[in-house]
Image (spheres, grey):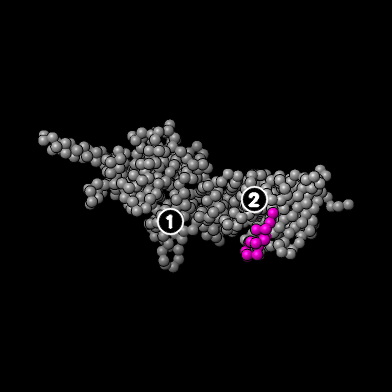
Amino acid sequence: MGQSIEFHFAPQGDTLEAYINCRDRVTMIMGPLGSAKTTASCERVFKQMCEQAPDENNSRKSRWMAIRNTYPDLTGTTMKDWCELYHNEHIKIGRMDNSFPPTHYMDFDLEDGTRVIAELVFLALDNEKAVRKLRGTQITGFWLNEVKELDKAIVDMCDGRHGRYPQNPTWHGMIGDTNAPDSDHWYYELAEQIKPAGWTFLRQPGGVLEIVHGTGMDRRSEWVENPHAENLHNLPDGYYINQVGSKKDDWIRVNLANQYGHVSSGKPIYQGLWNDAIHVAKYPLSPIVKVPKIMIGIDFGRTPAAVVGQLMPNGKLRVIKELIATGMGIRSFMDTLVMPYINVDLKRFNKSDIEVYGDPAGVAKSGNDENSPLGIINDEYNLAAYPTASNKPERRWEAVNTFLTGRIDGAPAMEISPDCPVLIKGYNGGYAFRRLNVSGEKYADAADKNAYSHPHDAKQYLCQGAQGEIDYAWRDAHLASTNTNQSMIADSTTGY
């Protein structure tokens, strides 16, 4: 009489359960170390092998492929975790063939009288031979283990190989698990920006939470245990918090707090205050007509940037759009990007509903035509434009921090549209204090001027404007001066 085995799946968390039960074409899960992602992938593969619809011979056939970036990682982690569940000294389902590529062949009966005939092929894509093997396969489903280590080209190739076995499979697709990648990784782009149809990206709670003390260069992080972390019942007491003391904050954020990393060598200015999971809207934000006021923060110079937002009646700031250019003066920027956006996306608003806030230095007149950037916006584009009350970096950062750290009705006081990718990457580390070329970790006290600094300057002016830090007196004086000049010109023209 054959061995009878019962498997009971008990996911240790809501996100893990959603991952195991999801049947979308592609499902990915991102989580911290020790959160049972790999185990959940094993359980899902096995469960779907048993779900495959039986053929005319009452056989449930499927062929899966587990992909890892290197052979040592494949054998030491992926295969090891699979075998601990389904092919060990106590349980041996089918047979394991360790020749190239290693394959677990399974053949067993279910209680309903059907027979599962399945195989799981383990493949490391670290050489040309393995890649050629992938090209010739016909697969039901792919399990991508530690997704962030895989090139996008490999994932694209896998996505074109599933569904070819068996004929008309009940389900076919890809699943994947990963620790948090960098914010410039293809995973981030798909999960947080593109969000392709048929792809589901799940994100587990972090094992620790970050509490920030101080501001600016004096900011420091305190790490505390997250009671909502998953798989805690299967981990030693204090598993996450005990790792904090010997690790750097950047490592903790990625591996324990489950936050996206960054590629900047500097110190992120909003480090510890920003979190994609709560500050980035799930879908692109559109202007709300019932909230009549549109606010635009603008940074001048030859690399101008504008950030469009709305302040809700409850005090929440919605950041809707970023407009960025290089090699343009203020008029070219307004004509090419800002006014087309206003005329199309904000066409349901009156110009009187729009306010522009800019660098106080923007009141200085140009030596070329005696016009200032803010004056040009007021006079030539008929928009109410004001300088903010201060251009001190600390004041500007603090205006942003107020919205980043604030809570309104249990939700963040600021929400940014995924239509603002440069802003978001800047928050994830691109906008930073530059690291000094000296021994030890020392940084400049000013933001590094780069592609992220200009939209972030514009965003700071927006936040200052939203908080009322505006020099209203300048515009009144400017309009009065303009009217006086126009009157003098009219008088000289008519002869009076």
Query: Which is more N-terminal, label 2 or label 1?
Result: 2
Residue 190 in percent (x, y) is at 54, 49
Residue 237, quarter of picture: bottom right
104 or 253: nearer the eye?
104
Would you say residue 132 sits in the magenta stretch? yes
Region in magenta: 123-138
Residue at image point 45% right, 57% down:
267
21 or 249: nearer the eye?
21
The disc placed on residue 174 is: 2
**Residue lying furthest right:** 1
Residue 176 in percent (x, y) is at 63, 52
Residue at image point 72% right, 48% down:
167
Q: Secondary structure at mark 2?
A: strand
Query: Total marks drawn?
Result: 2
283 or 474: nearer the eye?
283
Residue 261 in percent (x, y) is at 52, 55
Q: Secondary structure at mark 1?
A: strand
Q: Identify the amino acid type marked 2.
A: Met
The disc placed on residue 170 is: none
Q: Identify the amino acid type marked 1.
A: Ala
In screen coordinates, is 275 left or right of 397? right
In screen coordinates, is 244 left or right of 361? right
Distance CA(mark 1)–CA(mark 2): 36 Å
Mark 1 Cα within 10 Å, few/some/many (few <14, many 20+)? many
Residue at image point 71% right, 46% down:
169
Would you say residue 342 sits in the magenta stretch? no
10 or 152: nearer the eye?
152
For disc 1, the marked residue is 432
Q: Are marks 1 and 2 in contact (CB under 8 Å)?
A: no
Residue 228 in percent (x, y) is at 60, 46
